[in-house]
């Protein structure tokens, strides 16, 4: 009978947890956007944090590098390096072109190199330059008169949501007609 030596190895599996991404759902065009990515590495050390817009990487934080922050030139992205670090990226003067999915990828250092990625959508909105205005309104109406007026909002993205109220009562279809003009003005 042959004796077989059996060894039992204790395998410790250390991974990080609780990766969370916080991307504002909407930011006004021309303003700042603060994107955050938080995580708990437990016993691991951080290897890198990478930020993507779609498939394009635009920011990387690697603490072991001589210069931990690295930016990748993507049109429309202006990272405020002095306000960005391993847990946040600050974008300034955002444009509508950067709207879409943003991802944060966190990678632990060796030996695990465990990686997790979270994604969230950001929409850059464009507000009208002026308040909506009403045209066609008379100074007096009598019972039974038909009110024929327009409420117009200038260009915005997404289009402004306008609502009519007469004497405090909300007016709905079929009494309200909505029109979106090619130049982006929105009229009801």
Image (tube, rainbow, N blue to C red):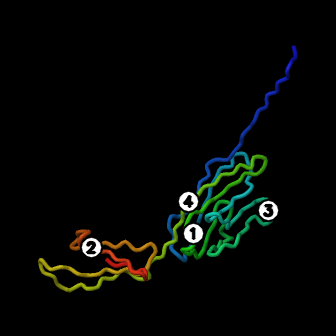
Asked whether the residues under the numbered discs 1 and 3 touch, taking CB atoms below 8 Å apart as contact, a structural biologist would say no
CA distance for labels 1 and 2: 36 Å
User: Separation of disc 2 and disc 4 at Cα?
Assistant: 36 Å
- Disc 1 to disc 3, C-alpha distance: 26 Å
Q: Nearer the viewer, residue 66 or 75?
A: 75
Quarter of the figure that contains the N terminus? top right
Residue at 62% x, 52% y: name it.
19
Q: Which mark is residue 65?
A: 3
Helix or strand or loop: what does disc 1 sit on? strand
The residue identified by callout 2 is 176
**Upstream in the sequence, badge 1 or badge 3?**
1
Q: Mark 1 — residue?
A: 33
Which quarter of the picture shows residue 178?
Answer: bottom left
Q: Secondary structure at mark 2?
A: loop
17 left or right, relative to 129: right
Q: Residues within 10 Å of mark 2 (few under 14, many from 20)?
A: few
On the image, the x and y values in percent for residue 39 come to 64, 52
Q: Residue furthest top?
A: 1
Q: Earlier in the sequence, mark 4 or mark 3?
A: 3
Q: Which residue is mark 4?
A: 120
Badge 4: residue crowd in 10 Å (few <14, some 14–19, many ≥20): some
> Badge 3, how many Cα within 10 Å: few under 14, some, many 20+?
few
Secondary element type, mark 3:
loop
Nearer the observer: mark 4 or 3; the answer is 4
Labelled pair 4, 1 in contact (Cβ < 8 Å): no
Q: Quadrant of the C terminus?
A: bottom left
Residue 12 on image: x %, y %: 74, 37
Examine the image and state in which quarter residue 51 appears.
bottom right
Nearest to viewer (mark 2 / mark 4): 2
Mark nearer the N terminus (1 vs 2)? 1
Whether label 3 touches label 2, CB < 8 Å: no
Q: Is residue 169 above or below residue 135?
A: above
């Amino acid at each position: 009978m042959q004796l077989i030596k059996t060894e039992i190895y204790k395998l410790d599996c250390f991974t990080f947890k609780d990766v969370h991404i916080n991307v504002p759902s909407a930011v006004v065009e021309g303003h700042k956007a603060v994107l955050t990515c938080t995580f708990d590495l437990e016993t691991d050390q951080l290897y890198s944090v990478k930020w993507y817009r779609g498939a394009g990487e635009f920011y990387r934080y690697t603490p072991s590098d001589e210069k931990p922050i690295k930016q990748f030139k993507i049109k429309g992205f202006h990272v405020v390096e002095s306000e960005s670090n391993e847990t946040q990226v600050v974008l300034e003067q955002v444009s509508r072109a950067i709207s879409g999915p943003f991802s944060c990828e966190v990678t632990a250092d060796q030996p695990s190199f465990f990686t997790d990625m979270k994604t969230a959508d950001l929409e850059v909105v464009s507000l009208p330059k002026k308040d909506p205005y009403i045209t066609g309104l008379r100074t007096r109406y009598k019972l039974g008169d038909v009110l024929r007026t327009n409420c117009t909002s200038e260009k915005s993205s997404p289009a402004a949501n306008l609502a009519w109220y007469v004497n405090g009562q909300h007016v709905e279809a079929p009494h309200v007609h909505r029109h979106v003009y090619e130049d982006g003005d929105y009229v009801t």
